[in-house]
Image (tube, coloured by chain):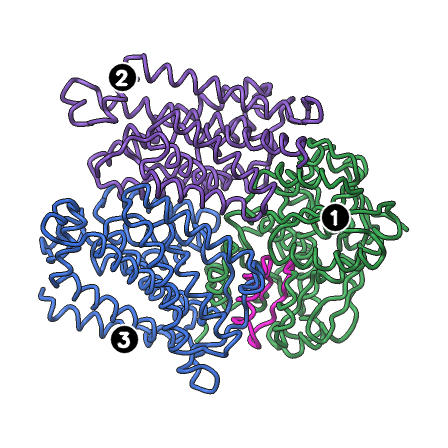
Amino acid sequence: MMKRKYLMAAAAAVLLGTAFGAQAQDKEPVRIGTIAPLSGPGAFDGQLAVEGMEAMVEIVNENGGILDGRMIELVKYDDKGNPEEGVSAAKRAIEQDDVDAIVGGWFSSVALTMKEVTRDRIINVMTSTQHPNTTKEGHKYLFRLNATSVMMSETYAKFICDKMDIETIAFITINDDYGRLEVENYERLLDECGIEVLGNEFYNKDDTDFTTALTKLKALDSDAIYVSAINTAQGATIYRQIKQSGYKGTTIASAGNMNPKLVELSGPALEGVYSVSLFAPDSDSEKLKAWMEQYGEMFSNEPSFIGSLGAQAVELLAGAMDEAGSARDYDKIAEALRGHEWETILGTINFDEIGQAMQNIYLVQVKDGEITSVNE
Amino acid sequence: MDYVVFAQQLTNGLVNGMTYVLIATGLTLVFGVLHIINFAHGEFYMLGAFFTYFAAKLLGLDYISAAVVATLGVAVLGIFANRLFFWPLRKEHEFTVLLSSLGLALLLTNGGELIFGADPKYVPSPFADSVFEVGQLIVTQQRVLIFVVGALVLFGLNLFIRHSRMGKMMRATAQNPEGAALSGVNIRQVYTVTFVLACGLAALAGALVGPTAMIFPTVGSWAVLKGFIVVILGGLGSIPGALIGGLTLGVVESLAGGYISLGFAQAIGYAIIIVVLLWRPQGLFGTARRT
Amino acid sequence: MSRKITIPVILLAALALPFMTANTYFHHLMVLWMLFSLLALSLNVIIGYIGELSFGHAAFFGIGAYTAAILGMHFGLAGIPGILLAAIVAGLFGFVIGYVSLRIVGPQFAILTLGFGSIIYTITNYWVDLTRGPMGISNIQPLGLWGGDGIALTSAIGYYYVILGCVVAFAYACHALMSSRTGRAFIATRENAPLAASLGIDVFRMKLLGFVVATAVAGVGGALYAHYLTVVTPDVMSMQYVAALIIMVIVGGRGTISGPIIGALIYVALLEALRALGPLRLVIFAALLTASVIFLPGGIVSLWRRITGADTPHQEGAQ
């Protein structure tokens, strides 16, 4: 029933363009399908994600691959950030291209649909989606890397309460699953520690101007404005417009979106701003440094959080397949992933029974245009 | 009511409205003169912003020169767009032409993604972060620039259409293409000039608005929708209509967002258009046209 | 070639299609093709028969999808009653919006539908208590007879046949309608509304009828989509779908029955076939799209007519 597509494999191998040992070339590669938004409004995030994965694939392959010399090969699919395209891509990956594992789920709506295609059929590592249902309705082969919104907010709220000298706060929030969940968490958490929430403004994901919202928020005269933005372009615009509006209070950047591009685009508007992330670029982890170096050699973009999640997915799959001794025995691979803690580029992680990763969460701050971790 | 906040929202609305005006004017020209619904209009706005960015980056031009170069460059592209995608279809049904423009829009967006890259970019302008303060009112110089340039360009365009020979030919074509052709109007030239003006105006809007936000290849899609709304609201083919329609929409959105609900601001804008159209189907400044 | 032979042959081919492959990826593409055929046929009633452009069609598709999803979530209705209710709700919205808008024609009508569509989208996106807003509704039950304990449709082939049935039924209905007196009244209305009115045709009623039918069928399509994909988010109402449906109808050939179905096939198949091109995919797609418009302004079906010289009664004046 399933046919191997040697042609595509060959094409991809040429693209990778690296000379492997004779032994390695004899063995069939392990093929990881990655389904990400590569066109449309999410294209940049998708690109960063796939680049992160490619850099990690390169590292694994240079070290001799997995399963005694099998190379990893990435098969890329564009989901346009659209659920039915995600299903098409996942079905094509499984049925037509016969991939060994799937990494995807950058957008929640796509992740929620895709998980039904992969359900109990294939190992599926979900990356940045924060929607709780991704894992709640998950399946035995589904794993999610990103911290849930609750986990992120708890860490961040603690810092905001303890270390930031503010009494009142206002929110500007993206009206999507991420923003809605985030603001819900903070309204509860910050209220508990006595910070008064003065207001919240939702904006839409296609908005390009935020002056109306910011005029409203500025009039509230809160000590801080919390910006919930996951899209780099919107985030940078908001930070700049906050500065342009003449707001004098503290700006707080949302969890999980601090990336070098955002810093570059926002210019001085982001200087000194805090955020929390699973990815601290200045960490002294050897694994992370190696990946960042590889990334720098291969791509012109800077390594980002979203790319590091993709890299971690590849890293974990490679490790678990090695441990299971097979790229296809999904029960064993899943068991390996759940079985113990993993040393990854983002530090030590482990998975709970529904496949949710417990990651380290770092506090970061923009200093002199660099994202640096804050040591408490 | 806090009057400072009100004045600030009003100012925001007027500036955003002027952006809509600049986008809508080109659309209304193409629409009014040639009866073409040009879905690709927003992409010329996108190109205007990107050309400004690359002119500044690659040629090392300052913002103003880069904006001028970009506007002229996209205006020239308008000649090709017309020759390839619109002129050959001039005798076809309007839906066919619409689809052609939709195809052009997809081509430019996806081509842009391929050539410019998907990453968002920032068009640097010396006016972007400098602020004008009038009392407690705060406006960036860039926004003042948008408003002033917009007003000047509109004034100039109005003069051109009212008094130049070409403008008269365009108006004749708008009213009756066959009749105009019979009385010696060079329709082909009218097509070219209309598209050059429309694309140039869209590009100018992109160059001016670029520095107030980030630019990315799909940025044109909202622009064309806003443009259409303004065109219909103001009245097809009417430049004063585009002006009043654009400013009205900007102010309505800003005040609705400021005092009712930000999330619903756009929807409220649409609701007002629906009410206006049901009351005056030809738009605020349009003349009733029998179809 | 006579219609008496071609139609049964095409039907048999459509019935046999899923058995050509055991690959569920192809089955999925077939489902998408049928689903878009249904939607494109429904939009064709507005574009091809009424002769107006609607930018709001995705909203009715979305209303159908949300009706089915919400009924399933709150009342466990996941079967035929849910589909019928989706049609009724979408049709009711269509009736109200059509009643208000259809007196206005041309670009203004298109913008009115855009406005209504956008308002429906915004409400869907913000009325979290009802629609769960941007979080969308996931885990929608598969289609059954009555929902709950009935038979549930889980395979793509099953959905293919159900939607194929809808497409055939609706295509036949369109054919029958357009061959009837009412159909001729439609054509008369589209070609020359004032003349039609002077001949005693109630132009407004004709248009409203067509609009309500189109929106109700879009609702059915939405409901089937929701059950098939099991997830619905406000994105189903986005301009992306509006543009896609307009492309299918016009590329295929508006005002015909085979046109929108062919258009849907081209849309689905071409986009999938072009996947191998990676980043060039959508650029090539757009180039082919514009080329087809410039060289075949009457749509793909006009190619057929050009070759055979054949014509069918209600295709007249479609160009």
Quick one: label 3, few (<14), some, or many (20+) residues within 10 Å? some
Chain in green, by letter, is: A
Which residue extends farthest right?
A376
Residue segment shown in magenta: A102-129
Residue A48 percent location from the top left of the image: 62, 49
Kindly identify the residue that appears in the image at 52 percent across and 30 percent down. Answer: B49
- Foreground tag (1 vs 3): 1
Name the element at disc 1: strand
Q: CA distance from mark 2 to mark 3?
A: 61 Å
Residue wearing tag 1: A198
The correct choice, above or below, for A315 with respect to B115 in the image is: below
Which residue lies under the disc numbered 2? B168
- Is residue C3 magenta-colored? no
Q: Amino acid at mark 3?
A: Leu
Q: Colour of chain C?
A: blue
Q: Is residue B45 visible?
A: yes
Tell me the subunit letter for badge 3.
C
Q: Colour of chain B?
A: purple
Question: Hey, which quadrant is residue A32 in on the image?
Answer: bottom right
